Image (cartoon, rainbow, N blue to C red):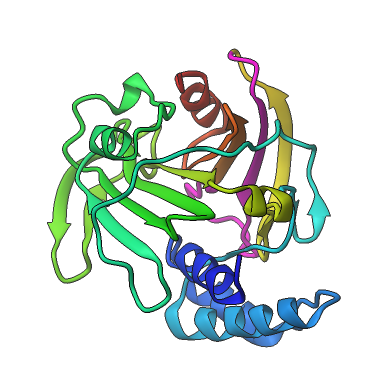
Amino acid sequence: MTKNNIKDIIDFELRQIKLTDQIKNNVRNNAIIRKPNHVWRSIAASLVIAILGGGTVFAGYQILNKIYVNEAILPALDSMQIVQINTIDAVPDEYGLIHKEYSDYNTVKNELGVNLLDSHLSDNNPYMMCHVKTDAKDFAIITVDNYILGDTDSYQFLEAENRYSYNHGTDYFSPISLTADLILSEAQMNNGWDTDYLGLYEFVECYTSDQGYIVNIVQDTTIEKDLENYISEKVAIFVADGIRYSLKGRVSIDVIKNAVSTMK
């Protein structure tokens, strides 16, 4: 994978979760995280610029397939494997990357020709926003916003922001989103694909799901004290059939574990 492609993957991840003003201030006031090579230093610099300018939380990528939380390695997941996908009918951008939007997850699965995991909790959901990003050679990233709605409601599409607003429920303070990371080539397999959750994140636990997946759970944290009704964002990360999945939402540990147990 080229340096440009690594940067583009990071830029994509940078857009996924909004930062609070407090976190922006923390980034401005704290030291830059350092890695022992010049490639990572340039990536770290662009991360800080993107955070201060765009206001999103980030997950950085370097080499191999480990999961880190603030540079602390988490228990190993099952191994990622090379996956074959169909050619996507879309024009690559200036970096050779293909971006394509879809209105539902089934269409993504059918066009890519991949037997991706799915959950019955996502059935009859008209509010999904799906995106595929790939270089059609080494990697593909599938994201599905509003994948599991739970008891959230009153969805309204905000055209200017290209997203849905909603009212939180009792069990779901937000819908659960889905991300799937696919390795497409031997070269990418040899390079690997690490994920590093940086900033206000902490490791919660590692467990084995009902289906036998090894699952790591991390959550965001806050430096604010005594926040009323604060529900941390949980991220459940696991590998199934060589594909790495992440389920993410502001829900309880029990709710995110239940979502994982329905992924078949």
Boundaries of the magenta span: 211-233
Q: Quadrant of the C terminus?
A: top left
Measuring from the top left, give residue 109's x and y in whole percent: 32, 34
The answer to whether any part of residue 160 appears in the image is yes
Asked if residue 217 lies in the magenta stretch, the reply is yes
**Residue at image x 73%, y 45%?**
203
Secondary structure predominantly adopted by residues drawn in magenta: loop
Compare residues 214 and 157 and report the one nearer the observer. 214
Counting every numbered tag in the picture gives 0
The answer to whether any part of residue 25 appears in the image is no
Left or right: residue 264 versus residue 200 is: left
From this view, report whether residue 6 is shown above or below residue 67.
below
Compare residues 187 and 149 and report the one nearer the observer. 187
From this view, report whether residue 88 is shown above or below residue 49.
above
**Residue at image x 41%, y 26%?**
115
Measuring from the top left, give residue 161's x and y in whole percent: 22, 68
Left or right: residue 180 versus residue 62 is: left
Residue at the far right: name it.
36
Left or right: residue 163 versus residue 159 is: right
Residue at the far top: name it.
210
